[in-house]
Amino acid sequence: MSGGTPVAGGGFMRQRHSQGYGSSGDDLEDDACSRMRPSSPPSPSGRTWIEIVENCLWLASAAFIVYFGDRRSNLIYLLWHDGRIRRLPLYLGMIGVGLNLLIFIYTSILAWSIRRFDEKLELKKWEITSIAALPFVTLCGLISFCLFSFALWPIWSFLTLPLLFTLFMACMVIIPYIMIGIFRPNIDELRTD
């Protein structure tokens, strides 16, 4: 017991005077509810300058690839109109990327709704769903990468692999900035404890 106010019967009585009281840490339940919550979630602005430079390099190299394409036309025009591209592997790779995006969006929305309702049973269901989806997402991503490499090899040959990896890394840099505004948790909730 963490001390308290003496009472007439010879014992001690704990009193909570305000939401911000602090205890000595002996009573874990009281100590846990008296800790202050962070005012906002960690933001991407807390990064070091090296990470910022790396992200800018990924984005600049991806923009260079998209803009210059094969030196005659940009990448978007090539994907739509160039006859050297093998179309079936390209379309199957796009279907694989689309499946991965659907799985990511589904697990993100599921995690957001669970955080919102804070149900223990639902949290366990989300953990099982997201863990079970990891092998499928990884396999689908690898197959899509191989299909894209096979489809675009006639244009860039051995440069296809670094080109696709650069585009993948640029997407990984951009996605957290897109998702952070959509699924921002509500921190200013009224506590009833």
Image (cartoon, rainbow, N blue to C red):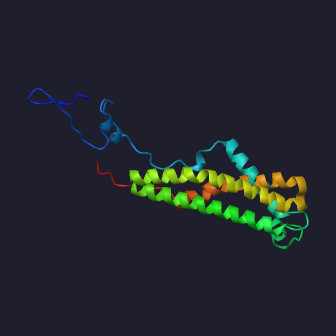
Residue at the left extreme, as displayed: 8
| Residue 126, image x, y percentages | 48, 54
Image point (84%, 68%), residue name = 78
Left or right, residue 91 beside residue 43: right
| Residue 16, image x, y percentages | 24, 40
The correct choice, above or below, for 151 with respect to 5 in the image is below
Left or right, residue 133 beside residue 138: left
Q: How many marks on residues?
A: 0
The image quarter in which residue 48 lies:
top right
For residue 64, say whether it is visible.
no
The image quarter in which residue 157 lies:
bottom right
| Residue 118, image x, y percentages | 40, 53
Image point (27%, 43%), residue name = 18
Residue at the top extreme, as displayed: 10
Left or right, residue 77 beside residue 123: right
Image point (32%, 51%), residue name = 191
Q: Quadrant of the N terminus?
A: top left
The correct choice, above or below, for 97 with respect to 118 in the image is below
For residue 57, say whether it is visible.
yes
Left or right, residue 7 beside residue 124: left
| Residue 179, image x, y percentages | 58, 58
